[in-house]
Amino acid sequence: MHPFTDSFVLALRLIGNVDAELVRIVGLSLRVSVTACAIGGTLGVLLGTWLAATRIALRPVAVWFVNTLLALPSVVVGLIVYLLLSRSGPLGSLGMLFTPKAMVVAQSLLVIPLFAALSRRLLLDALSEGGDQLRSLGAGRLQSALLMLVHERLGMITVILTAFGRAISEVGAVMVVGGNIEGFTRVMTTAIALETSKGDLPLALALGIVLLGVVGIVNLVISLLPGRTAAGREAFA
Amino acid sequence: MTAMTAVESAVLGAPLQPLVRLEQATVRFGDVVALRAVDLALHRGERLVVVGANGSGKSTLLRLLHGLVPCTGNRATFPLAPGGRAPVMAMLFQRPFLLSVSVRWNMLPALWLHGVRGRAERERRCHQALQRVGLERMAGRPARSLSGGQQQRLALARAWVIEPDLLLLDEPTANLDPSAKREVEELIEDVARAGVTIVISTHNLGQAKRLGTRVAYLEAGRVVVDLPVDRFFTDRLPREAEQFLKGELPWT
């Protein structure tokens, strides 16, 4: 059979057999990326909100820096976290290197600029539309931006999905700081990289299909959250 | 005698309690001068109607009175007597911006921001304001699903709920059909009767007659005329104001 057909059959077999190793790998991938999005999202959205609201002189420089970090290669993030967490590094005493915690740190750093830049853009558009009106009600710039976060919550869901997609699909950082240790730090992407290097391309592709399926299910669950409006569903269109 | 003092002496009488005073106030947006050396004093209980063509600076003047835009020259607000607290200001915009939440949740942030303590008190005032504009049954509906007139009434309720001393209305009926226009005008009358000082910008001179006690005509960012409402429509005015009246009156 064709390698692609093999991969689909294999992917279906892996899912159908409820392969224990696969379940563990998928579980760890989800746990690491969801935690990283929660931590990175909180910090990134706060940074984006502040950047949308502040009028300090250095704001253009800060915005340029955050936008530049959007292109930060994940392997470089992994390298930085590796240097910080290695025994000789400033945070070496925490003993986090080659643990899922280190992978969370790396993915959090990876998604912070994404959350900051996208939420800032979203808020700026909203503030240009209604910022004056909120300020006329007594809101300061930061309060206006925070209220706009509520207003733009459906757009923020798209930002979360984008960041989650980046986190769960990256391989460089988690490989460097996690080490791809079987049964401990192996996640979907590092497993795919490993199987590719071993030459088992159908299995690697099958794992890729499963990864895509997992992300698809997460997107579907979020799109079905209660309280979504027609306008919100358009964000997924 | 300047236009401002003429109004003070002719219509409002003394002593008047000033709320906001502009002296030689100029507002620039980049190279564009939106307001030029405006002198204007606003007193408690007045209903000032600002008229003028598109781009004459009406909206900027209202924003400046509120303090939403910076200016060169002087803008001063005066504490209210007795008590000495700062006047509370609210503004209703031509196209109201409503948060993508329910009608009720559009009201509550205004109350939080003005430090209204206690959930029960906030709910009471919210309910009262919505009742006043006839939207109490729609409190749970998404604000953005309301019709244009209902959205404008909600924005008016949101401005009114903070119990402003000065309410600025920027062409509040410009996009409304005649029926919704009448409803909003009646609400503005209600608010004004409650003692709130009103500044309203409009193209509609009929509305100026109905709602105002004083009319200011703006052209190219300058206050050309500032007179009591009856004199504005009877006195001989500067040429540009006369032309505006001739152009506008047949349509009112």
Image (cartoon, coloured by chain):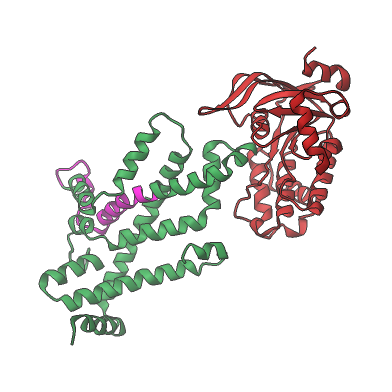
Chain colours: A green, B red
State the residue in front, A124 or B9: B9
| Quadrant position of residue B75 | top right
**Residues in magenta, as a range:** A87-115
Residue at 34% from the left image edge and 39% from the top image edge: A64
State the residue in front, B131 or B9: B9
Residue B119 on the magenta span: no
Seen as rendered, the residue at the extreme top is B1
User: Is B244 left or right of A159, judged from the image as shown?
Assistant: right
Q: Main secondary structure of the magenta part?
A: helix
Seen as rendered, the residue at the extreme bottom is A1
Can see residue B252?
no
Seen as rendered, the residue at the extreme left is A198
Residue A102 on the magenta span: yes
Quadrant of the drawing holding the N terminus of chain A = bottom left
Total numbered circles: 0
State the residue in front, B83 or A156: A156
The relative height of residue B118 versus residue B10 in the rendered view (above or below) is: below
The relative height of residue B134 versus residue A192 in the rendered view (above or below) is: above
Q: Position of residue A84 (x, y in %)?
A: 21, 45
Q: Position of residue B7 (x, y in %)?
A: 83, 20
Q: Position of residue B165 (x, y in %)?
A: 76, 32
Can see residue A97?
yes
Residue at 63% from the left image edge and 47% from the top image edge: B97
User: Is B10 left or right of A235, judged from the image as shown?
Assistant: right
Q: Position of residue A26 (x, y in %)?
A: 30, 70
User: Is A189 left or right of B42, judged from the image as shown?
Assistant: left
The relative height of residue B130 versus residue B209 in the rendered view (above or below) is: below
Residue at 26% from the left image edge and 75% from the top image edge: A22
